[in-house]
Amino acid sequence: MRAYRHSVLLSLLMASTTLILSNTLLAAADPLPSWNEGPTKQAITAFVNRTTNQSSPDFIPQEHRIATFDNDGTLWPSHPMYTQLAFAIERIKAMAPQHPEWKTKQPFKAVLENDMDTLASSGEEGVAQLVMASHAGMSTAEFEAIVTEWFKTAQHPHFKKRYTQLAYQPMIELLKYLRHNGFKTYIVSGGGIEFMRPMTQAVYGIPPEQVIGSSIEIKYELQQGKPVLMRQAKIDFISDKAGKPVAINRFIGKRPVVAIGNSDGDRQMLEWTDAGSKSSLKMLVLHDDAKREYAYGPAEGLPDTKVGAFSESLYKTAKKRNWIVISMKRDWKRIFSFDSAEQLGTQNTGAKTFSTNE
Amino acid sequence: MRAYRHSVLLSLLMASTTLILSNTLLAAADPLPSWNEGPTKQAITAFVNRTTNQSSPDFIPQEHRIATFDNDGTLWPSHPMYTQLAFAIERIKAMAPQHPEWKTKQPFKAVLENDMDTLASSGEEGVAQLVMASHAGMSTAEFEAIVTEWFKTAQHPHFKKRYTQLAYQPMIELLKYLRHNGFKTYIVSGGGIEFMRPMTQAVYGIPPEQVIGSSIEIKYELQQGKPVLMRQAKIDFISDKAGKPVAINRFIGKRPVVAIGNSDGDRQMLEWTDAGSKSSLKMLVLHDDAKREYAYGPAEGLPDTKVGAFSESLYKTAKKRNWIVISMKRDWKRIFSFDSAEQLGTQNTGAKTFSTNE
């Protein structure tokens, strides 16, 4: 009995000691190793330190540590086109045998003929037609299965990696660092909510209930007595621009204290965060790294683009209000998880990236 | 140095021992003291035991332990009228001096004259007019302040207690018991999302981001350069009946494994939960206790009512599908937190109920 108790105590002791050691190691390690030293990294750690230190005047109670991240262009690339548009195009091609009429009907004809100029000229309405044809008319369960399957194999045309391998490594570290400090991390994207949810836990460590996005209407039906949620070909809500604060209010009911985006679609989310009474961190990713990723603005004289534009007007607002502009070129030591390995000349198959990272 | 290390080890040991002791005490204590012993209580604890035991075939990983609760009639009374309707009526009366036209305009005239028959005859459209007049045309921050203030003083006409003191004690225990076992507890109510959020943390231990409800449209505006979210006099979404599974899918993106309601408005939420592949717990509160609360159905020959009706058809479905019907009379030892104190003849001021309960 005495021996038993002794061994229980001993194992408790060892567990406690291990805990202390690993906490010490954690504190000593740089939580943001893919960020270069400099004012941006300093601003992040200074913000986290002063808002999580109970004796600081800027202390934020844990239940108010809400951090909202845009997705496309902020957490992963949005060039040469939004990932969801690439998905829609590939789905249209896959579904074409069941739709012979698409051979002569725009914008489907353009997609099937890889005629990107004609597709671009079909504008938002054309894109909406593609999205509805590829995203609606099925149950939420069927759509989830299709998206999950697609993410397993679909590759980015430039990087030749699966999309789920292209999450920006500095952002993955920032998400973890914030969570480690009691912040609840959300995605607030203009992208489709049910297109993102199948991959966010594995790629970003963000569960479905912390993913906010645009949605189409969903209808509850009984099919042969079995309940299904059917996706309707009708827009329900666009979570972009002024829609972002509205969506944040609806889903979270609290104002964020961290808001991070990359384009004019994120302006209102940062404004709304900035207008709160608590200390807050507002950041915008500037894609100024043509070599490692892409370079576009048109802010700062970078090439103009229609996809995820960062306007000069937004740039001026950021400077005026002390929103931090993250320079990918200057602030990020590496961009993708496979960067460093390749720099070291190591073969990187990327096979391990699509797995739970927390 | 040695003495120091010794004392560190000793305090670790003591901390560990305290932890073990308090866990033991916790396991021994009844987590549901306000529930009478019987099949309902047994079904709850059996469900929690088999879904949280890793070696059980019914084990549910923690991220899928989603529990959704209706609010009105499930977590607190919905009689003699929905709390939110009482709020709307009191607001109309408070706002009347600024609206002289209401003296002659229905349904406002009926409200100001306490003419409940005429108000009832104005139907859903009349109620919608009252709700829009009292809930829209202001910012979300202003509305939150009004609701918060109202909950501090407004009293239930029968119980003469503040509404926030009327949360059912057995349900508060059930919410805590589920959370203690790794379930994430949500409210999914037909009531207004922003009417509930100011009180759910304090009353139920449920934070704003886990409250789902009906909503009116919200518009983002800059007023003199300051961002505000303005409440519009237009319905956005009704989270009732078939709207409940739709709202659950939108906000959570996972299917619940616990769903608890009390009326025909909850049928689809329970159906949707029941149709999942995991083991699940479905329960409906039957108000069969005229003495301690209210008695209405019309199920089981209880008085018919238009507020929160539990139909015979729903009752039959429940029996057929083994959904548990909670009898307030038989299953609940006490209904309100102040019940036992009053039974013991203790003066209960209720002053402490409106505070964080977890």
Image (cartoon, coloured by chain):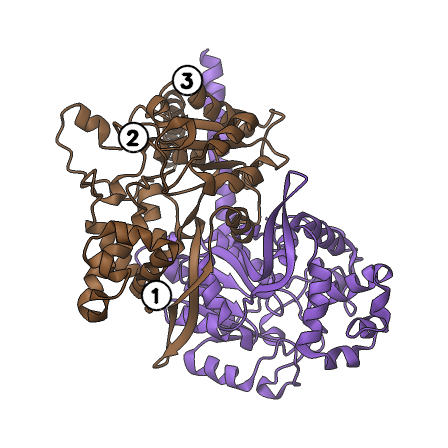
Chain colours: A purple, B brown
- Mark 1 on the same chain as mark 3: yes
The residue at which mark 1 appears reads as: B136
Q: Which of marks 1 and 2 is in front?
A: 1
Instruction: Inspect the image, locate mark 2, and give the three-letter code of the amino acid beneath it.
Output: Ile
Q: What element carries label 2?
A: loop
Q: Mark 3 lies on which chain?
A: B
Residue A149 as seen in the image, left or right of residue A184 = right
Q: On the picture, is A139 further left or further right than A8?
A: right
> Does residue B156 appear anywhere in the picture?
yes
Residue B335 shows which numbered tag?
2
Residue in front for this viewpoint, A182 or A314: A314
User: Given the image, what chain letter belongs to the residue carrying mark 1?
Assistant: B
Q: Quadrant of residue B76?
A: top left
Residue B122 coordinates in the image, percent (x, y): 33, 55
Whether residue A31 appears in this view of the structure is no
Where does label 3 land, which residue? B38
Task: Tell me the crowding category of disc 3: few under 14, some 14 to 19, or many 20 or more residues within 10 angstroms, Cα based.
Answer: few
**Which circle's residue, 1 or 2, is located before the other in the chain?**
1
B99 and A16: which is toward the camera: B99
How far apart are the two marked residues, 1 and 3, measured between alpha carbons? Answer: 46 Å
Q: What chain does badge 2 belong to? A: B
Check disc 1 and report its element: helix, strand or loop: loop
Q: In the figure, is residue B146 to the left or right of A22? A: left
Q: Which residue is drawn at 44% across and 13% down?
A: A2
Q: Compare residues B161 and B181 and report the one nearer the observer.
A: B161
Residue A207 drawn at (x, y percent): 56, 50
Residue type highlighted by circle 1: Ala
SS under mark 3: loop
Q: Residue furthest bottom?
A: A301
Do pointers 1 and 2 mark residues of a single chain?
Answer: yes
State the CA–CA distance, disc 1 to disc 2. Answer: 34 Å
Of the numbered discs 1 and 3, the one sitting upstream in the chain is 3
